[in-house]
Image (cartoon, rainbow, N blue to C red):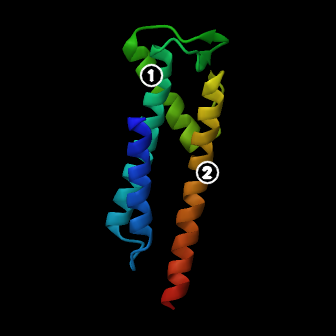
Amino acid sequence: MFIAVCIFMNFKNVVVACFQKNFLSFDTIIIITYLYLSLLIGFGMIYLICMESNLDVLSEAGNSLTGDYFDKLFTSLYFSAVTLFSVGYGDIVPIGIGRLLAVIEALIGYILPAVFLARTVIGIDNSK
């Protein structure tokens, strides 16, 4: 729950930054970068918490993930990054509730660039 609140608060900061007069500022780029990092780490932590709670959310080569805590941490962060920024490579596959989490993360990853682009075009158009 805490992770979801942190992600929501980062969205709030980006929305506030989007409605500034000068959208293409260095500060806005930094805020967007922090948003992507918080999404990546937030979803990675959700995957990790699920795995540590003995829920199968990710599989590698058809098998549940094994290894120590740090192996699972790096794998969940890697999967989160691949899911947020691209379609995925297929080396790690979500299973069970992990599929829903991956769909939500991928949807956010696809919508954010479109929103930023549309907001920038609207801002440039309004300034003319």
Residue 7 at x, y percent in the picture: 43, 45
Point out residue 51 in the picture as x, y percentages from the top left corner. Answer: 50, 17
Residue at 51% x, 82% y is 124
On residue 49, the disc is: 1
Q: Is residue 95 left or right of residue 36?
A: right
Marks 2 and 1: in contact by CB < 8 Å? no
Q: Position of residue 19 (x, y in %)?
A: 43, 73
**Pointer 2 local density, CA inside 10 Å: few below 14, some 14–19, many at least 20:** some
Earlier in the chain: of badge 1 and badge 2, it is 1
Measured along the vertical axis of the image, is residue 23 above or below residue 61?
Answer: below
Q: Nearer the viewer, mark 1 or mark 2?
A: 1
How crowded pointer 1 is (Cα within 10 Å; few <14, some 14-19, many 20+) is rated as some
Quadrant location of residue 68? top left
Closest to the observer, 55 or 84: 55
Q: Quadrant of residue 12?
A: bottom left
Relative to 117, residue 112 above or below: above
Tell me the kind of residue under disc 2.
Tyr
Q: Residue furthest left?
A: 27
Q: For the point 66% across and 26% down, which residue is it?
A: 90
Q: Secondary structure at mark 1?
A: helix
Can you see residue 88? no
- Whether residue 31 is visible: yes
Q: Which mark is residue 126?
A: none
Residue position marked by numbered label 2 in the rendering: 110
User: Image check: 99 left or right of 70?
Assistant: right
Q: Amino acid at mark 1?
A: Ile
Residue at screen point 56% across, 76% down? 121
